[in-house]
């Protein structure tokens, strides 16, 4: 018998092919499944954390003055002590890894099992304290960290492959968090790479598909906010509320970005020095302010704001106070500058929904759900300055095919208005904290890079 047909030879050949298939497909598929599983679990845990907090303070709102500062202060201290690199939404870390010079030490500091634990544990700790933090940005960081750990299964990993794993994990994380696969692809192209020349190859698409399948299997084929009711055809006069909403949200988003990027200009130097010396007291002090706002507004500002946005979008008759977007904006700023792991997507959508209620009251002849959705897109596009991702992500969350043109127009106008005053937030944060990179057009803000 010829050698190539002997059982031993066949076994070696089969084992070689199996190993090749595992490296080419299996590692990626397993990583994508883990990202999808993490996205679903994190979503469930985040909801449960907020419900636990609301149960604690039900009928005793004054308890928030103890619980929120204690949990936020402890979480900030642990972030600085053991989980440095897990702070914020995590998207600036991914941008730094994709665009900065290769630095293995920095990669280890920003991704991996330690970051995964910190992002989940400390993010949930902040949510348990009622802070205005979202889970979607952290899910992007979690997805990137999971894929970064999967590199260990390869005998050799090139820089290109390492960055592709990070990109695929990030996109899969966003897709799994919102159940929006198309937005995941656009997010990878528009936000993380800032280039349409990047090829959306099989690694990226496969990761999103497998992550989405896990989310579908565990959470069902759901719409993040539910199906809205809005007409498919609007009169030409609808242009006016669209433009007003876009400009309003563009200015509000620019104000938020500038507040985060220029902390050294509005926070006294003594307070900044105290922040670096005493992270526990810094976190507790900001937590106390968030608690005071939550109590003063009757609990409207607790958590990410998902419930408030959903009620406004579905037009269930439950309106928020006229000042809701303003106090939610303030609570979001205070929560984010703590330095805790936490994202901006859900709170931004909630703030936009609040502005949508304003516009709906000005133009009562149009459906509230349509105007709320438009403002949600506008504010998110202003903050991220990723108009395509913003309008697609909201469109997929509400199945708003009839609003494609108004949503797209609002996203484009809002992002351009914001860009007059501020660079894209995530790129600017990456530049300040992790590496020096041009942030494109618009004034480059300066802030304390150590925060």
Image (tube, helix red, strand yellow):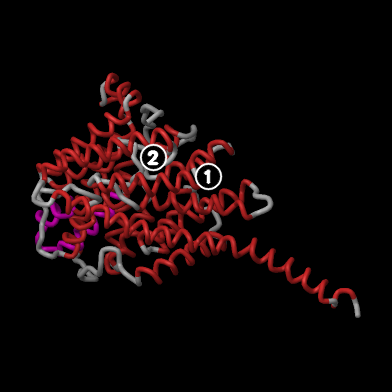
Q: Which residue is mark 1?
A: 98
Residue 155 forms part of the magenta stretch: no
Left or right of 150 on screen, residue 448: left
Element type at mark 2 = loop
Expressed as whole percent of the image width and height from the top left, the position of residue 298 reads 9, 48
Q: Give the alpha-carbon distance from disc 2 to disc 1, as whole Å.
A: 18 Å
Q: Residue furthest top?
A: 270
Q: Nearer the viewer, residue 208 or 73?
A: 73
Q: Which mark is residue 239?
A: none
Q: Residue at x 37, y 41 (%)?
A: 88
Q: Residue at x 32, y 45 (%)?
A: 383
Element type at mark 1 = helix
Expressed as whole percent of the image width and height from the top left, the position of residue 93 reads 46, 42
29 to 195, vertically: above or below: below
Quarter placement of the N terminus: bottom right
Expressed as whole percent of the image width and height from the top left, the position of residue 275 reads 31, 26
Q: Which residue is mark 2?
A: 87
Q: Nearer the viewer, residue 10 or 305?
A: 10
Quarter placement of the C terminus: top left
Which residues lie in the magenta part? 354-380
Left or right of 97 on screen, residue 322: left
Residue 421's quadrant in the figure? top left
């Amino acid at each position: 018998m010829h050698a190539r047909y002997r059982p031993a030879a066949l076994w070696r050949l089969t084992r070689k092919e199996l190993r090749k298939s595992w490296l080419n497909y299996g590692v990626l598929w397993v990583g994508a499944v883990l990202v999808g599983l993490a996205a679903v679990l994190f979503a469930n845990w985040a909801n449960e954390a907020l419900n636990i907090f609301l149960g604690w303070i039900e009928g005793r709102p004054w308890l928030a003055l103890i619980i929120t500062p204690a949990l936020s202060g402890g979480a900030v201290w642990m972030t600085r002590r053991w989980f440095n690199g897990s702070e914020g939404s995590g998207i600036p870390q991914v941008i730094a890894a994709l665009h900065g010079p290769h630095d293995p030490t920095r990669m280890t500091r920003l991704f991996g099992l330690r970051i995964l634990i910190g992002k989940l544990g400390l993010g949930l700790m902040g949510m348990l304290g009622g802070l205005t933090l979202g889970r979607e940005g952290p899910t992007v960081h979690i997805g990137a960290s999971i894929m970064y750990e999967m590199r260990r299964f390869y005998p050799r990993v090139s820089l290109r492959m390492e960055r592709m794993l990070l990109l695929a994990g990030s996109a899969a994380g966003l897709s799994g968090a919102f159940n929006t696969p198309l937005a995941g692809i656009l997010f990878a192209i528009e936000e993380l790479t800032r280039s349409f020349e990047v090829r959306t190859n099989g690694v990226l698409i496969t990761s999103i598909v497998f992550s989405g399948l896990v989310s579908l299997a565990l959470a069902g084929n759901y719409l993040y906010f539910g199906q809205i009711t809005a007409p498919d055809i609007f009169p030409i006069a609808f242009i006016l509320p669209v433009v007003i909403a876009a400009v309003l949200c563009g200015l509000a988003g620019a104000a938020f970005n500038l507040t985060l990027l220029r902390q050294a200009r509005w926070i006294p130097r003594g307070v900044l020095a105290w922040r670096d010396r005493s992270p526990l007291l810094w976190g507790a002090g900001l937590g106390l302010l968030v608690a005071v706002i939550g109590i003063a507004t009757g609990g409207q500002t607790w958590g990410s704001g998902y419930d408030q946005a959903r009620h406004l979008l579905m037009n269930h008759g439950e309106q928020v106070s006229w000042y809701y977007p303003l106090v939610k904006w303030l609570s979001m700023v205070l929560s984010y500058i703590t330095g805790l792991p936490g994202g901006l997507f859900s709170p931004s959508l909630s703030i936009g929904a609040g502005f949508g209620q304003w516009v709906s009251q000005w133009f009562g002849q149009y459906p509230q759900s349509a105007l709320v959705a438009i403002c949600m897109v506008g504010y998110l596009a202003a903050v991220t300055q990723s108009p395509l991702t913003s309008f697609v992500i909201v469109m997929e969350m509400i199945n708003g095919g009839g609003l494609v043109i108004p949503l797209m127009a609002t996203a484009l106008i809002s992002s351009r208005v914001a860009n007059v005053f501020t660079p894209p937030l995530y790129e600017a944060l990456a530049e300040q904290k992790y590496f020096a990179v041009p942030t494109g057009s618009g004034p480059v803000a300066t802030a304390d890079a150590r925060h």
